[in-house]
Image: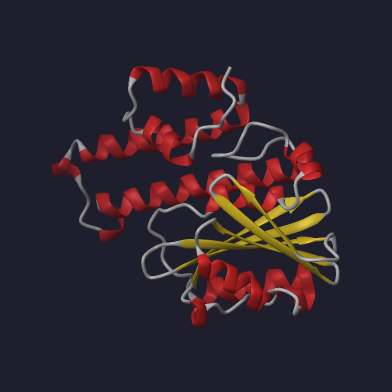
Amino acid sequence: MIHLAPSEADLHAYVDGQLDADARAEIERWLAAHPERAAVVAEWKRDAEHLRTQQALPEHWPTNPMLEPAHLRRRVRARRRARLGIAAGLLLSLGLGTGVGWQAKQLQVASARLPMADAVSAYRLFAVNDASDTLDPRQRAELQDWLQVHFGSNGAMPDLQAQGFTLVGGQRLSTEQGAAAMLVYADRNGARIGVYLRPGGWFPEPGQRRDGELLAQYWSRGNTSFAVVSPFDDRRARNVASVLGPRG
C-alpha cells in the first residue's frame, strides 16, 4: 500500500513517460486508489499526447507564434496547474485529502492535530519550482479584489520586495470555514515562500512548527489566521513572518 502521495514532478514524469516500470506501476496503483487525481492526470495525458503528435509533424507546425511548440508546452503546463488547483480546492473544501507531495491522510484529521496543516499542504501543491512569470497588473488587481471581499483589511497583499521576494502566483481555495488563499513569492534565484490566509482567529499567540523540510510560522489577526510557509533553513522567511505577523 502506498503511504505517500506522488509529488507533482513525479506525476508529470509519469505523464511524459519518464519513469521506470516500477515507479510507473506504483503511481498507477496510487491513482487507482485516488480517482479524483486519476481524472486530472488523464487530462494531462491527453494534452501531452496531443502535443507529442504536433511535434512529430514539424511540416504541419503553424506559423502563428501562439501555436509554436514552446508556447504549447507552456500552455499545457498552465492547464495542468489549473486542473490541479481545481482538484486541490475541492480536496481542501471537503477535507478529503492533503494534496500532491503530502501524506495520503485526510486533511480534516491532520488539521485537527497540527496547526496550519492546510497551509503546508497548499504550499506543497502550489509553491513548485517551475518557471512562473510575475502576475500582470490585471491579475494582481483581480486577486487583490477577491482577497478584500473575503478578508477585508486583512486581505491586503503583502509587498515583500524589501525582503527580496516578488509575488508570482496566487491560488484561491476553500476550507470548511470559508475562502482561503495561498500567495506564492519568489526571489531572483527562484526560491519560494508562501503566505497563506484562512478564516478564523485560531491562534491567540503566534507559533511555528516544522513539517519535514518545511517550516510553518502562524498567527491570527482579528478573524483571519495567517501562515508563512517556507523551507526550514530559509532565514529570510523568519524575517518575513516577523514583518507580517503581530508585533511582540
Across and down, in percent, residue 163 comes to 51, 78
Above or below residue 179? Residue 44 is above
Q: Identify the residue at image location x=36%, y=36%.
A: 48
Query: Would you identify the image quadrant in which residue 239 lies?
Result: bottom right
Q: Of 61 and 147, which appears nearest the observer?
A: 147
Q: Of 235 and 46, which appears nearest the observer?
A: 235
Q: Identify the residue at image location x=42%, y=40%.
A: 9
Across and down, in percent, residue 223 comes to 85, 67
Query: Would you identify the image quadrant in which residue 60 lies?
Result: top left
Q: Across the whole image, how many numbered discs are drawn on residues?
A: 0
Q: Quadrant of the C terminus?
A: bottom right
Across and down, in percent, residue 170 comes to 58, 62
Across and down, in percent, residue 129 comes to 42, 53
Q: Identify the residue at image location x=63%, y=51%.
A: 210
Q: Identify the residue at image location x=41%, y=48%.
A: 77
Above or below residue 36? Residue 175 is below
Q: Of 168 and 55, which appears nearest the observer?
A: 168
Q: Quadrant of the N terminus?
A: top right
Q: Of 110 and 239, which appears nearest the observer?
A: 239
Above or below residue 15? Residue 139 is below
Coloring applied to the structure:
secondary structure
Q: Residue extending furthest left?
A: 59
